[in-house]
Image: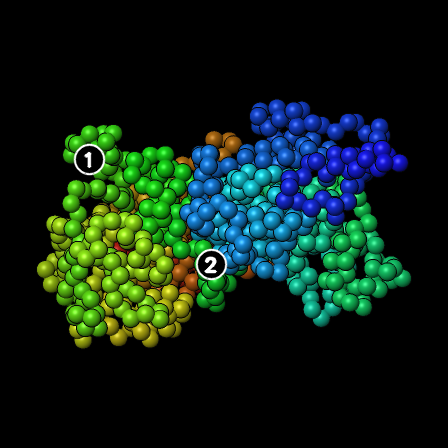
Amino acid sequence: MPAMLSAVLEEEADMYEAFPPHVDPTGITILTDSPPGKKAPLKTFEEVQPLLQQSRKRELKLVIRENSWPINSPVRALLWPALCRQHQHGKSMLDGFYWDMVTQVFGTVELPDKPIMLPPFVEATHCLGYHLTRKGRAVADRVVSVLGYACPDITYSPSLYPITAALLHFMPEEECYHCMASLVASKEKMFITQTKLLNEVTWKTVMQIAKKHAKSAAQHLSRLSGAIGPERIYADWQWWILAALPFPHLVRVLDCFFHEGIKVFYRVALAILILFHKHSTNQSSDWYAEATKNGVDHAIDKFCRNMPASPTKLLRTAFSIRALSSQYISRVFIKTEMTLKSKQVITGSRLVRSRSSDNLPTSQSQVNIQMMSHTLTIRELFTLWSWLPVRITMYQPVLLYTTEEHGCSLTTFYVRVEHHEPTLLMIKTCNNEVGIMYTTEEHGCSLTTFYVRVEHHEPTLLMIKTCNNEVGIMYTTEEHGCSLTTFYVRVEHHEPTLLMIKTCNNEVGIMYTTEEHGCSLTTFYVRVEHHEPTLLMIKTYNNEVGIMYTTEEHGYSLTTFYVRVEHHEPTLLMIKTCNNEVGIMYTTEEHGCSLTTFYVRVEHHEPTLLMIKTCNNEVFGAYCSTRWFERNQKDERGNRQAYFGTGETFLFSLYPERAKYPWVGCSNDSKETVAHGSELFMAADSRMITIGGGDGQAIWMDENIRFGKTDRCSTFNNPPLCPSGDFEIRVLEVYGFSGA
């Protein structure tokens, strides 16, 4: 008997050998879909690996779909990391990079005794641990927290935690982080939504494709939803899969998901609706009674938890939905996203910004700098990165010049650096001195005094001790010495802090003032446009200097903008996009009235913003989503395409009326396809430029950019943008977005 018991225990231990120590396998149900010998033997990783190495993606997709590896198969420990690595964007991370990040964020690689504070982009109610032990949950918390700091652009991603936890069932912590970083950074396919907007787009996409490809199931769901409406049901679509499906079913779904992307989740969601419809369509069925008694949302959740179909049957149902192509899903997704963005602009709604969205370096940026900098540690990198403009932190730094590698030659410096903008110069001197130019204790709490003492010094960094403390200086090199250790001892536990530095001989010159250079926007651009960053100071006629309106402080309201700004003259507006600065590329005042010059300066930029001011002072224009170079593209027959562009293009009028005219397809909620005459966005050749077509042209300009006309058109359903219809151009300005 003891020998038999020992054999049983050994067999059970072998059964759970595939799981790492931070998983409690005792609650995991081992399913077998069919008796042994009924199907071909399952593929090993050694048999799958060549398909990955040779990028035979279609064959690999079929193999993963057809091989129902049991949940305790050792294949996933190798397969999942390999599948995730194929979506990696940019260079691979250095060995030990994750643990350097852990040390940077937590101060040690040891798991803390106290719970780890998670980034606010996760939802506490959906931090699913599945079968992780207490230590495993702490590991998942740590991976997600490091991801939050390494990927500051994530603002809302409730599915990120459950997918991290699922990965940890089959791999160690560092491997899990690398997999998640690859999925988050993937450019080719979407795996994890990272904003509230895209999260909403996904469930609305599921609702749209269900109405077409699971029509009966969608109608059944709509009938059962009653007063609450189907939207609320679809909003929980991803939790049908991530929270409600039995773990063996979820793991098989993830097998396909890690290769094919979020479209697998879409198909599985439709399969769940189809199966639920099949089991609840009869009014005498238990599931129909459950839906009518407790609500269809609870019924679907319970149905998923007691899924009557095996993992294989669930996937077979999902992948047998016909004509549901990736291209179709993508079209629905993009159209839904555009519609929601348009509504967001119109209503002025704002999304909650994540604490992790402070401008901290991305993981790839840290890799690049570690590989090329002889002086930066990770700690110094975080400090330096926090000083950069947020828009610059979205891009990867590239080392252009260092005296250690390229020598001490100004000529070499110019050759390597002069065409790059912006640039960050790091100088390590022998005897840097630091001095204080302004303190409230000594000079008083006056913004005027602050400007008088500080405005001509650049660069400057400010140190303030706030919150429950008096304003004072925590560290100066004059008093405490030039020691980074002393700096950290005195400063690192205070938050927030601002630092003030005075260099030895940096001088700042004024590039443009209206008093000296006149009130000309052209002169302003000529003197200023190649300098970055720049600091703009505006003094009104009432001698007020400062910022009258910012979206961060005053909100996204045009009414508020007018109330605060309209009585101030002159005013200078600075616009900063999410990660780009707006710059002028072409203006008829500076570059002349030539279509050729227009194309030379503008055609490779995407998107562009055209602003037209007529001789009658009307102001209108268009946001053009596509490069003007597309006018040269040819179709299959070798003919140049007449029209090009996308539905992001829109028209606007600023004077005498203010109005925006988006593409008519954005407001088309019906299933009807938009007519070809309503998809004529942009056209151009050597003799003219046209924006908007179909029963008229919204904007047409001649080759000399002197005369134009405007009519109603089907693409934007706009009225003529100026009353007369014909206009003479006083100024045409074209703006681009550097870095876009």
Task: Name the mark on residue 414.
Answer: 1
Residue 727 visible from this viewpoint: no
- The quarter of the picture where the N terminus appears is top right
Quarter assignment of residue 411 = top left
Going by the numbered disc 1, the residue's amino acid type is: Tyr
Query: Which of the two marks, 2 or 1, is nearer to us in this view?
Result: 2
Q: In the figure, 411 relative to 127: above or below?
A: above
Q: Is residue 185 left or right of residue 618?
A: right
Crowd band around label 2 with a 10 angstrom C-alpha radius: few (<14), some (14–19), many (20+): some
Q: Is residue 147 left or right of residue 407?
A: right
Q: CA distance from mark 2 to mark 1?
A: 40 Å
Where residue 679 appears, as percent x and y from the top left, is 51, 50
Residue at 79% over, 41% down: 31
Colour scheme used in the picture? Answer: rainbow
Q: In the figure, 541 relative to 491: above or below?
A: below
The mark nearer the N terminus, 2 or 1, is 2
Q: In the figure, 412 relative to 319: above or below?
A: above
Going by the numbered disc 2, the residue's amino acid type is: Ser
Task: Name the mark on residue 354.
Answer: 2
Residue at 38% over, 57% down: 710
Q: In the figure, 454 relative to 691: above or below?
A: below
